[in-house]
Image (cartoon, helix red, strand yellow):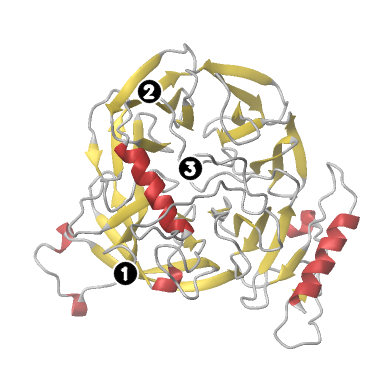
Amino acid sequence: MRHIILTALVSMAAAAPVAAQTADMPSWIDAKTGHRVVRITDAPGNYALYFNYNAYTPNGDTMLFQTAEGIKAMDLKTWRIRTVLKKPGVHLLFTGHKTRTAYFSRRNRDGVDVSSAIWAVDIDSGKVRKIADVPPGSRIDTINADETLLAAQIAERPMELQPGSKGRDPKTDQAAYAANGPDGKPLPYAEAKEVRLDERLEAKIPMRIFTINVRTGEQRTVVQSTDWLNHLQFSPTDPTLLMYCHEGPWHKVDRIWTIRTDGTQKTKIHHRIMNMEIAGHEFWSPDGKTIWYDLQTPRGEDFWVAGYTIATGKRRWYHLHRNQWSVHYNVSPDGKLFSGDGGDSEMVAHAPDGKWIYLFHPHDIPDVAGIHAKNAADLISPGTFTPEKLVDMSRQNYKLEPNARFSPDGRWLFFRANIEGKPAIYAVSTEKRNSLADDKPQRSGEAGQAEQAGPINCPIFGR
C-alpha cells in the first residue's frame, strides 16, 4: 500500500505544472512516525549542501540548493522555488552569513573542482561577480562570519581515493569504494572506505590551509603539514576563528582542531583517553559558542554527541543507543533540539534498526539530591537524548548521506535521500502531523498505512 501511495505521489508531481511560481509539492504522513514529509525536488542534479555548510540567508527567509540547471532558492515563507543562477556546471559552496550572497565554483561531470576562481551571485538580483582567483587544485570550504576571508586547503599533489573510479552512482550520487582485507576477500563498503582513507593519510603529501582576502585577493598560510587537513569551518560568529580536522581513520588521528587566522592559538578540541576512541563529523552551534561532534568510546560500542564550549573548555556529552547513532548530527537554532540522520547496518554502529531521521530531546543528568562533587564544574556534564523518529528511511541507500539540517525556525528538517529510488531533497516536520488549513487527509483502508495529503499549497503550508 505504501508503494502505491508513493507511486501516486510521483505521478501527481509529474502532472504538476513546472514554473517558477508553482509551489505544489507532494507530501504524505509517514506511516511509522506520524510526521509530515515533503518532497521539495527530485530534479536531475539536485544537491542540498553538506550538513555543516550554511544554506540560509542571514535573515533566515531563503534556503539555497542546486540542480543540474544551476543555483536555486526556496522562499521559506511561501516554499516557492526560483532560479538564482541558470548555469550548468556550477558548484554551490555556501551562503554568506552577512549578505544575501551565494558563493560557487565550477566542477566537471565527475564532481572534480576545475575552477581557478571563486564566484558570487546576489540571491535577489542574480548579479554575478568574481570573488578571488585560487591556485588550481584548491578546495574552498568556508567563508568567515563577516565575509572578508575564504579558507581553503591545497595539497602538493592530488591523490585519488579510489584508484580507477569513474563517474558517480546515479542512485547514491557517490563514487564507489572497494578494497580487500588482510584475508584477500572484498571488504564491506564502510571498511573499504577506511582502507582508502588510511592510504591517503599515510601518503604524507605536503599540504596547507590558507585564507584568501575577499577584498584584496591576498593569500596567507595558516597551517602547513604532511598530515591530511580537511573539513574547514569558520565560526559563524567569530571572523578569525577557524576549525579544521586531521582527516583519516578516526581512531588513528587527533581529528578536531581550532586555530586563529594568524596561525596562533592552535587548540586540540578532543583528547582521546582510550584506544579505538573516535571523534569526528564536527560542527558549530549556530551561535558559535559550542563545537559539537560524534564521539564513540570505543568505536562502534558506546555513542555520544559531545560538545565543547569555546569560551570555557566546558564539555557536555549526551548518550545515545546503537540504533540512534547517525552519520551526521545537527542542532536547532535555539540549541534546544538535536537531529540525527541515521545509518545502515554496515556502518560503524552496525545498527540493526538505525535507518531513521531522528529528533533528539536532550536531558541533563542532575546531581542526586543536589549533592555535588567538589570538582563537579571541572568534569564532563553528562546527559541523555529522548529520541523521536521522524522519517522511515528503511529504503535509503546510505552511500547517499542525508545530511539533515534544521530550518531557521526549527520547525523542519531538510535532508537528501533516495527513499523513492532516486536522489531528492525532502523536508520533514519536527512537529507531529503538521497540518494545513486546507488539508483533510483520508486514512487509507489498510490500518497503519500512510495518509496521503496531496500537493501542498505552500503559502498556507509555510506558516
SS state under label 3: loop
SS state under label 2: loop
Amino acid at pointer 2: Glu
Q: Earlier in the sequence, mark 1 or mark 2?
A: 2
- Where residue 328 appears, as percent x and y from the top left, is 46, 56
SS state under label 1: loop
Q: In this view, does 161 lie above or below 290?
A: above
Q: Tell me: 68 left or right of 180.
A: right
Residue that appears at 54% across and 49% down: 176
Q: Tell me: 365 left or right of 369.
A: right
Disc 2 or disc 3, which is closer to the eye?
3
Q: In this view, does 53 lie above or below 322?
A: above
| Tag 3 residue | 162
Label 2 with label 3: CB-CB less than 8 Å: no
| Tag 1 residue | 301
Q: Quadrant of residue 129?
A: top right
| Tag 2 residue | 156
Is disc 2 surrounded by few (<14), some (14 to 19) or many (20+) residues within 10 Å? few
